[in-house]
Every structure is written in C-alpha cells, then in structure tokens.
Image (cartoon, grey):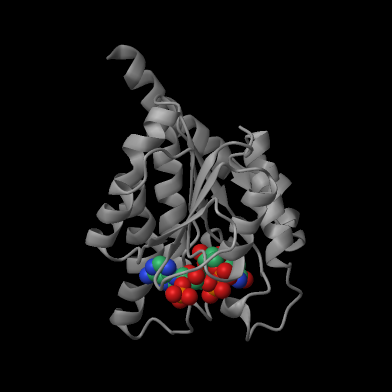
Amino acid sequence: MTIADKTVLVTGANRGIGRALVEEALKRGAKRVYAGTRQPLAHPDGRVMPLILDVTSAPQTQAAAGSVESLDILINNAGLAFYDDLSDRAALEQHLAVNLYGPYGVIQAFLPLLTRSRGAIVNVLSDAALAALPIIPAYSISKAAAFSLTQSLRALLAGRGVRVHAVIAGPVDTDMSRDLDAPKASPESVARAIFDAVEKGEEDIFPDPASQTLAEGWRSSPGKALELRNAALIAAKALKA
Ligand SMILES: NC(=O)c1ccc[n+]([C@@H]2O[C@H](COP(=O)([O-])OP(=O)(O)OC[C@H]3O[C@@H](n4cnc5c(N)ncnc54)[C@H](OP(=O)(O)O)[C@@H]3O)[C@@H](O)[C@H]2O)c1
C-alpha cells in the first residue's frame, strides 16, 4: 500500500495529529484527501475536500459517505479526552460516543467503498488502550474498547481484503495533552510514522519514541499470539462456508 495516488479520509482533520496526517498524505502524493471536521475548513491545496463530519452524528456520517465516490484509506483520528474519576456515568458515555461509537459508525458507513478498493482502516488509539491511565479512566476504557473493535474488524474484514491498523500512540504534542508534563512527540513525526507503517503493512503501529518501547514486547506477547489464534477461528469458518 503506497499513499501516492490514493484517496484518504481523515476525521478530526482541523488540528493536532489529524491536521498533520492531512499534510503528510498530501506530501506523499495522495490524489484526494477528505478532511472531516465539525466546523467548515478551508485548505489551499485543491486535493483537499472538506467534509462536515461530527463522528457522533449518524446523519452527518451518512451524508459524508454519500458524498465520497471512492476511498482507499480511512483514518479514524477524531478523539476526545478529559480528566475524570469514573464517578460520572456521563463522562464515560461521552468518551464512548466519540472514541468507540464514532469510529464504529464511520467504518460502517464507508465499508462498501473500502471493500471495493480493498483499502485500509487506520484507528488512532493510545497506549492507554493497553494499560489504563487512571487519571483519564473513561478515555482509557474507550480506547481499550476501540482496540478490541480494531482486532475483531481486522479478523472479520481480512477475507474482503480490507486491512485494519491500530495506532498505539504515546504522548503527542497537541491540545489534547497540553496539561501532561512528559516528553511528547510532534504530530508531524507521528503522522510520518503512521504512513510509513501503513505503507509497510504493519498492523499495530507504534509511532513515537515512547510507544516504540512497547512495540517488540507487544508483537511477541501472549496477548498478540492469542489475537492471531482467535482470528484463525474466523478464517476457518470462512473456509468451511
Ligand atoms: N495527543 C496525545 O498525546 C495522544 C496520544 C495518544 C493518542 N491520541 C489520539 O490521537 C487522536 C488525535 O488527537 P490529538 O492529540 O490530535 O487531539 P486534539 O488536538 O485534541 O484534536 C482532536 C480532534 O478530534 C476532533 N473531534 C473531537 N470530537 C469530535 C467529534 N465528535 N467529531 C469529529 N471530530 C471530533 C477535534 O475537532 P474540534 O476541533 O472540532 O474539537 C479535533 O480535530 C485522538 O484519537 C487521540 O485520542 C492522542
């Protein structure tokens, strides 16, 4: 999979990692970049097509899918994080709405196009999906659930030729991590690492120095081995059918 001449859609494209992904896709020669945003966006590059897309809105998601003719790579980047302590159910529901049901709905809406192109889905997750960060527990739950969604879709869609990538990012220097006092990777370097890994076909992507310390351990872990063994159940079922 190369990015040149491909059509890419990025959600949450107006700032942070999403904006960097749009710029990196353009640099790599993408034919068209759909920039999903909640507010209207203007971009000087004629290859960028703005799409109004609040990922929690089913009507907007349907309208966006209806206005896109073909798609090779869907990047579910839009995300929400705020501090909580699990005492407020509404906080958990808000995180799940954006970080789990958001990508779920967008994937379902664009799946026919991605199946037709034998394309790729890239879900921007977090290392909090692997181990909860208890200062942001609702966010951690939503990213763990989105990781599970990613693993199941990876197995379910493999037979249709659609690849599903998980981005297990560590701290990145954006508005989201403004208050976090830790070394952070630049959004630009993270966007480059994400596209490098998609081009190489790496299914689990560790795009920054902090997350890279987990990469080798994760790939050789019992958890990853179990994921592969469980995925084989779907492949075996498909063979029998
Ligand atoms: N920054 C980090 O340290 C870090 C680490 C690991 C993973 N991540 C993940 O990376 C992704 C991008 O985060 P970021 O750091 O770039 O955060 P950010 O700077 O806060 O940007 C978040 C983006 O998501 C959009 N968004 C939020 N709710 C949305 C909704 N309901 N519908 C559509 N778009 C929505 C925002 O749009 P508006 O401008 O309209 O609010 C914004 O474009 C997220 O999935 C995040 O969880 C970030």
Residue at image position (33%, 19%) is 238
Q: Is residue 125 left or right of residue 111?
A: right
Q: Is residue 64 left or right of residue 36?
A: left
Report x, y in % for residue 235.
40, 22
Quick one: 98 or 137, which is closer to the camera? 98
Quick one: 152 or 63, which is closer to the camera? 63
Outermost residue, top direction?
240
Asked if residue 3 can be seen in this view, the reply is yes
Outermost residue, left direction?
59
Q: Is residue 170 left or right of residue 57?
A: right
Could you tell me which quadrant the N terminus lies in? top right
Query: Is 240 above or below relative to 132?
Result: above
Query: Is 230 above or below relative to 11?
Result: above
Asked if residue 132 can be seen in this view, the reply is no
Query: Is 149 above or below relative to 208?
Result: above
Dividing the picture into quadrants, the one containing residue 114 is top left
Report x, y in % for residue 38.
39, 71
Dividing the picture into quadrants, the one containing residue 5 is top right
Could you tell me which quadrant the C terminus lies in? top left
Report x, y in % for residue 102.
35, 60
Quick one: 107 or 43, which is closer to the camera? 43
Residue at image position (58%, 40%) is 203
Residue at image position (66%, 64%) is 170
Query: Is 15 above or below relative to 112?
Result: below
